[in-house]
Image: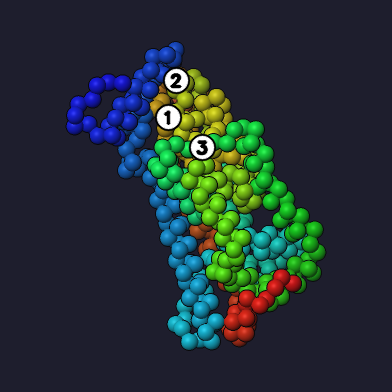
Amino acid sequence: MKNLPQHQSESDVHALCSTDDIEQAASRSRIRLVRRPGTIAGKLPWNDVRNGKLWRHGTQLILVLMNVYICTTFYFWVRFYETGGATAYVSRPAGIEGWLPIAGLMNLKYTLETWNIPPIHAASMLLLLAFLLMALLLKKAFCSWLCPVGTLSEMLGKLGKKLFGQTFFPPRWLDIPLRSLKYLLLGFFLYLVVPMPIEAIQAFLMSPYGLIADVKMLNFFRFIGETTLISVIVLAFGSLFIQNLWCRYLCPYGALLGLFSLLSPFKIRRNPESCIDCGKCAKACPSRIPVDRLIQVRTVECTACMSCVESCPAKDTLVFSIAKPTGAPGQTRTRGVSGMVVALLLTLILGGTIGYAKYAGHWETNLPEQFYYRLIPGSQMLSHP
Ligand code: SF4
Ligand code: SF4
C-alpha cells in the first residue's frame, strides 16, 4: 500500500486499498481494464443517481417507514375496539394484510379453484401475488429491496461487522443443510394449506379466528411468549455474526420466492471478455455467491441486491440483464438495468396491485363494525378452529 499523507482519512485509505487491489488485478489480467465512468476506486459516489445502492437503501427506508406507520395505526385501530370505543378511532390500514402470508396462501388456493376473489383478507392474496410476480421478473428483489425483516437483518449484519470487525460464515458442510431448513418450513406450510378442501378454507377464514387473523398476528407479537421471545433474541443476536441469518436459513417466504425466481429472465450476468478477475463482486455478495466464477447467477439465493454490480470496476461487465453481455472491454453490447429501473419496476408492481385492489373493491376487508366490537376485546381467548 502507498505511504499516506497525514491528512488522509480512513475512507481514503480504503479507497486507495481498493484502487491498489484493482490495479493489481488489472496488471495480472490479460484483459484491458476499461473503468466504469464516474467511479472512484471502482465505485460510484453514494449520491450518484446511477448508484443502485442509493435506490435500494431509499426503497428500503420508505418500506420500513410504511410498515412502522401500518403497524402503529393498526395497533391504535385494535385499541379502539378493545376499549369499546374509548380511544381515538383510526381507520384500519389494509396494508397489514401483507403480514398474513398463510391467509394469502389459503385465499390463493380458494381463488384458483373457484375463480372468485375471497371476501375476507383478499389483499393478503393480492400482495402475495405481487411479490411472486416480482420474483418471477426480478429474482428475490422483494427480500433485499422491500422486506422490512430483510432490512433489519441486513442492518444487524452491518452492525455486527462494525462491532466484531468481520462476518462469520458457517462452513459449507453446515451451510447447505442449514439452508434447507427454510424449504422444510415452506413444505410444512404448503402441506397444511394445499390439501385443504375449499369448504375447510372458507370455514377457517369465516371463523372468528380467521376474521381477525390480523389481530391475532398483532397479539402474537404484543403478548409474546417466553419461547418466542428467546427465539427472537437468539435470531437477532445471531444476525450480528451471520449475515442475513433469518433470510438465508429460515424464512419460508423467501424460500417460496426463491423457487419462483428460478424463472426470472433478469439475472446477474458477467461478460468474461471484459472481466479482469478482481473478485470484488464475489466479495461484495451478501449471499456468498461466487459471482466472479459464473457467467450468469441462477441460484435461488440471489436477491438482486446489485451489490456485486456496484462493486465491479469494469465498464458494463457485470449487469442485471435479460441478455448475456458480450464484447471487448468498453464495447459491451448488452446493458443491464440500473437500480433506478429496478426501484421503478418494483413500485409499479406494488402500486399497480394496490391500485387494482382498491379499484376492484378487494383492498379492504369490509366487516360490519359490530363484529369488531364483539370479537376484538376477546381476541386473546380465540383459539385456532
Ligand atoms: S449475486 Fe449480486 S445481486 Fe445476487 S445476491 Fe449476490 S451481490 Fe446481490
Ligand atoms: S465481474 Fe467481478 S471479477 Fe470481473 S471485473 Fe467485475 S468485479 Fe471483478
Instruction: Please report the residue visible at 61 percent of the width from the left and 57 percent of the height from the top.
Output: 128
Q: Secondary structure at mark 3?
A: loop
N-terminal of the pair, mark 1 or mark 3, is 3
Q: Quadrant of the N terminus?
A: top left
Residue 32, given in percent of the width and then of the height, sits at 40, 16
Q: Is mark 1 within 8 Å of ligand 2?
A: yes
Which of the numbered marks, if any, corresponds to residue 312?
1
Tell me if mark 2 has few (under 14), some (14-19) or many (20+) residues whose alpha carbon lies within 10 angstroms of its own. Answer: many
Residue 34 visible in this rendered orientation of the protein: no
Judge depth for marks 2 and 3 and give the one in front. Answer: 3
Question: Disc 2 versus disc 3: distance between alpha carbons?
Answer: 27 Å
Return the residue at label 2: 276
Judge depth for marks 1 and 3 and give the one in front. Answer: 3
Q: Is mark 2 within 8 Å of ligand 2?
A: yes
Q: Quadrant of the C terminus?
A: bottom right
> Disc 2 marks which amino acid?
Ile
> Disc 1 marks which amino acid?
Cys
Q: Is residue 101 above or below residue 31?
A: below
Q: Is residue 248 left or right of residue 40?
A: right
Asked whether disc 1 touches disc 3, contact meaning CB atoms under 8 Å apart, the reply is no
Residue 165, given in percent of the width and then of the height, sits at 41, 37
Which of 96/269 is in front?
96
Instruction: Please report the residue visible at 79 percent of the width from the left and 62 percent of the height from the top.
Output: 196
Instruction: Please report the residue visible at 58 percent of the width from the left and 53 percent of the height from the top.
Output: 131
Which of 269/234 is in front?
234
